[in-house]
Amino acid sequence: MDWRVFLTTFGVIFLAEMGDKTQLAAMTMAAQTKRPWAVLVGSALALTAVSAIGVIVGGVVGEYVPLIWVKRVAAVSFIVIGVLILMGKF
């Protein structure tokens, strides 16, 4: 295992997920249901599934599309989503 890649990935994902809508939703669900362990397991499995999809798609796309284009498409996507959020349409 490449520990540098592992730790970098962990750090980036951890910081990106801190305080986002997913964490707030999990906190709300745990408070409402009074079942924190069920919420933990459900949210952990959901994040694992979404991450697995991202890794699989990224692995396949990385074989056929140059990295610079992947970054450009991601950047444009974030900009479009940001504009849509500011306009109240997302």
Image (cartoon, rainbow, N blue to C red):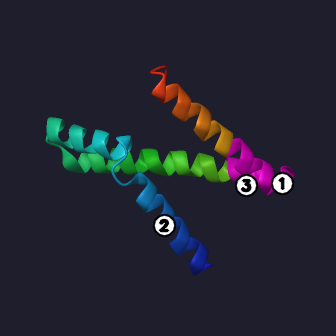
Residue 13 falls left or right of residue 80: left
Give above or below for 6 relative to 63.
below
Q: Are marks 2 and 1 in contact (CB under 8 Å)?
A: no
Give the residue number, with chain letter if any, for mark 2: 10
- Residue with the mark numbered 3: 59
Magenta-colored segment: predominant secondary structure: helix
Q: Secondary structure at mark 1?
A: loop
Quadrant of the rendering where the N terminus is positioned: bottom right
Q: Are marks 2 and 3 in contact (CB under 8 Å)?
A: no
Nearer the camera: disc 1 or disc 3? 1
For mark 1, what is the residue?
A: 66
Residue drawn 22% across the image and 39% down it? 28
The answer to which of 48 and 15 lies nearer the viewer is 15
User: What whole-number distance in Å separates the C-alpha atoms at marks 2 and 1?
Assistant: 24 Å
Q: Amino acid at mark 3?
A: Gly
Which structural element holds mark 3? Answer: helix
Q: Which of 48/7 is in front?
A: 7
Say which amino acid is labelled 2: Phe
